[in-house]
Image (cartoon, rainbow, N blue to C red):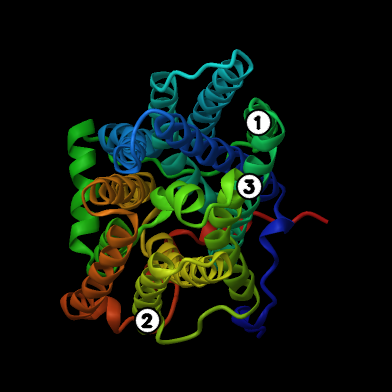
Amino acid sequence: MTDAASSPIPSPFAYPAYRAFFVAKLGSTLAQMLMVVVIGWQVYDLARATMPMREAAFLLGLIGLAQFLPVFALSLVVGVIADRMDRRVIARVAVGLELLCAVVLASLAFAGSTLLWPLFAVALALGVARAFAAPSLSALAPNLVPPAVLPTAIAWNSIGWQAGAVLGPVIGGLAYDLAHPAPYSLAAVLLLASLVALFLIPKVPQRASSSGSGVESVKEGLRYVRGNPIVFGAISLDMFAVILGGATAMLPIFARDILMVGPDGLGLLRAAPAAGAALVALWLTRWPLKNNVGVKMFFNVGLFAVATVVFGLSSMLWLSIASLVVLGGADMVSVYVRSSLIQLHTPDDMRGRVSSVSLLFISASNELGEFRAGMMAGALGAVEATVLGGLLALGVTVLWARLFPELRDADRLDLPEEMLARDRKTEALTPPN
C-alpha cells in the first residue's frame, strides 16, 4: 500500500486558478505600493514647503490613520460577507475601486494639483478597498489548492506580496522623478491586469457559513480568535510589535531631512524591508520551518525590534538599508508562521471572518503604527520616536513569550487531523498537464 504522505506534493502553480490568483495579487500589490509610497512623499513634500518638519510628520501620521479607519469600520462586516458570498466577486469590486483611485490620482497629477485634501480622500478610499480585498483574497486562497499544498502556497503568496512591495516603491520613486503622473498611470495598468486575472478564476468550492445574523456571525469570528491562544497570540503579537516598532511612516522624513536622498532614495528605503522579506520567503519555499516554529517566531520578532533601533540611529544610507533588509527578513518569518497557523487551524466556513479579524489587527499594526510614529515624531523627533518604538516592541516580544506559552511552545506547522478530514474533498482539485 502506497504511503500518501510520501507522494511528492505538487506546486501550487500546477493549479490554473492559483496561477490567476497569484497574478492578481502581485499586480494589485505592486499598484498599492506604487500609490502608497508616492502619496506619502507628496504629502510630506507639499507640507514641508509651508511648515516645519514636526508638523509635516504629524500629517504623515494622519495619512496612516485615514487608511486605517475604513478597515476598522468595515473589516469585520466584510469577513461575514466573505463567508457568505462569492469571494471572487468581492475581490473584483475592491480592485475596481483601487483602479478608480489610481485614475483619480493620475488625473490630479496631470492637472498639477498642490492640494492636500484630495490625497487624504484617496487614502481613505484605498482603505475602503483594502477592507474588502484583503479578507476575500486571504479566504479565497485556501480554496484554490489542496490542504497539503497550502503551506507552500502561503509562502508563494508572501513572495508575491514581497516582490510587489520591493518593486513597487522603487518603480514609484523613479517614475515620480520622471513625471508626477507616471506612477499612478502605471498603477492603473497593473490594477486593470489584476482585475482581468480575477475574472479568470473559476467558481471554487466554498463552505457556507452559519445562517445566524450578521452581528452574531461577527461575534462568532471574534470568539473563535479569542478562544484559540495560538491564533490570538500570533495576531496580537504582530499587532503590538509593529504598532510600536513600525518605521515606514518615518521614511519620507529620513529620506528628505536625515539621509537627504530624495524620492528615488525613498523608494530604495521603502523597498529594503520587502527585499529582505522576499529573500526569506524564497528560502522558506525551499526549506520550510520544520520544528520549534514558536521560538523562531519570537526570536525574529525580537530581531525586528532591534533592527528598528539600528535604523533609527543610523545616519548612513547603506546602514539604514541594511537594517531595513534585516527588519523585513525577520518580519517575514513571523508572517510565515502566523499565516500558516491561522490558515491551517481555521475551518473554511470561518476563514473569511478570521481573516477579517487578522486584517483588523494587521491594519492596526501598520496604519495605527504609522499614526503612532507620526504623533511621536511630532512630539519627540523622528529619530527619537523610531528608537523608542523599537525598544518598546522588544519589550512586548518578551512579555508575549510569557503570556502565550502555547504559541511559544508551538513545534510544527502541521495540518490538524480534523482539518484534513473536513477538507479532504479539496484533493479532488487535480493539477493540469
Residue at the disc numbered 1: 199
Q: In the picture provided, is 255 more to the left or to the right than 207?
A: right
Residue at the disc numbered 2: 299
In depth, the one of 208 and 54 nearer the eye is 54
Query: Can residue 239 be seen in this snapshot?
Result: no
Q: Amino acid at mark 3?
A: Asp
Residue placed at 63% from the left, 42% from the top?
173
In depth, the one of 220 and 421 nearer the eye is 220
Q: In the picture provided, is 382 more to the left or to the right than 24?
A: left
Residue placed at 65% from the left, 25% from the top?
181
What's the distance in space between the residues labelled 2 and 3, CA to CA?
A: 33 Å
Residue 308 locus on image (x, y percent): 39, 68
Q: Amino acid at mark 1?
A: Phe
Q: Quadrant for residue 331, please give it.
A: bottom left
Q: From the image, state whether disc 2 or disc 3 is nearer to you.
A: 3
Q: Quick one: label 1 or label 3, which is nearer the N terminus?
A: 1
Q: Residues within 10 Å of mark 2 (few under 14, many from 20)?
A: some
Residue placed at 49% from the left, 29% from the top?
94
Q: Secondary structure at mark 3?
A: helix
Residue placed at 47% from the left, 43% from the top?
206
Residue 363 locus on image (x, y percent): 34, 47
Image disc number at residue 264? 3
